[in-house]
Image (cartoon, helix red, strand yellow):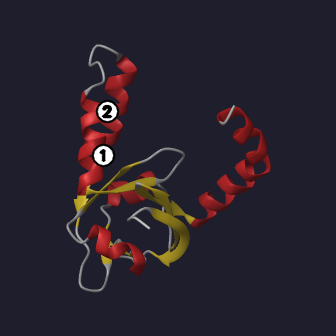
Amino acid sequence: MDNSFIGEYNHSLDNKGRLAIPAKFRSSLKKGAVVTKGLDGCLFMYTEKEWNKWVAKLSEMSTSQGKSRAFARLMLAGAMPVRIDVQGRINLPKYLIDFAKLKNNVVIAGLMNRLEIWDEKTWDKYKKQTEPESEKIAEELFV
């Protein structure tokens, strides 16, 4: 299997903004990572390689389009490089913690090329809303 991120993991965010990364993901992130404001109320975390691919896609968007500018601002201005410390943790800045409304209990979800960092209650609410619709969503996406 390649270095795809998959799975759901519960971790704690300490009062200094430190968050342990699941051990199985650490080797993929050892060269560094980028955390940014995500969608649906979470944070996105990319390896440096995947982040550079994402930035290339964003740079192709038209700056004359207001929605393109707004989305690029969300992703790029909200981004922060992070390093995993010797205990396998990253340090999240307050503005990202506030954006995702992270409390003590956090879910780290692997989604192939990125990790998503969710407040546990927000994640549970999101799943309760989307899981009952999973068959309908699949039918619409895989026509």
- 21 to 115, vertically: above or below: below
Q: Which residue is denoted by mark 1 in the rendering?
A: 78
Q: Residue at coordinates 46% horizontally, 56% vertically from top-left?
A: 112
Observer-nearest of 114 and 91: 114
Q: Residue at coordinates 50% horizontally, 68% vertically from top-left?
A: 103
**Residue 10 in picture, x, y percent from top left:** 54, 75
Q: Residue at coordinates 49% horizontally, 77% vertically from top-left?
A: 11
Q: Residue at coordinates 44% horizontally, 68% vertically from top-left?
A: 1
Query: What is the secondary structure assignment of the residue under circle 2?
Result: helix
How many residues crowd mark 2 within 10 Å: few (<14), some (14–19), many (20+)? some
Query: What is the secondary structure assignment of the residue under circle 1?
Result: loop
Observer-nearest of 1 and 12: 1
**Residue 105 in picture, x, y percent from top left:** 54, 73
Q: Horizontal placement of 13 versus 83: left or right?
A: right
**Residue 131 in picture, x, y percent from top left:** 74, 53
Residue 72 tag number: 2
Q: Residue furthest bottom?
A: 87
The kind of residue tagged 1 is: Gly
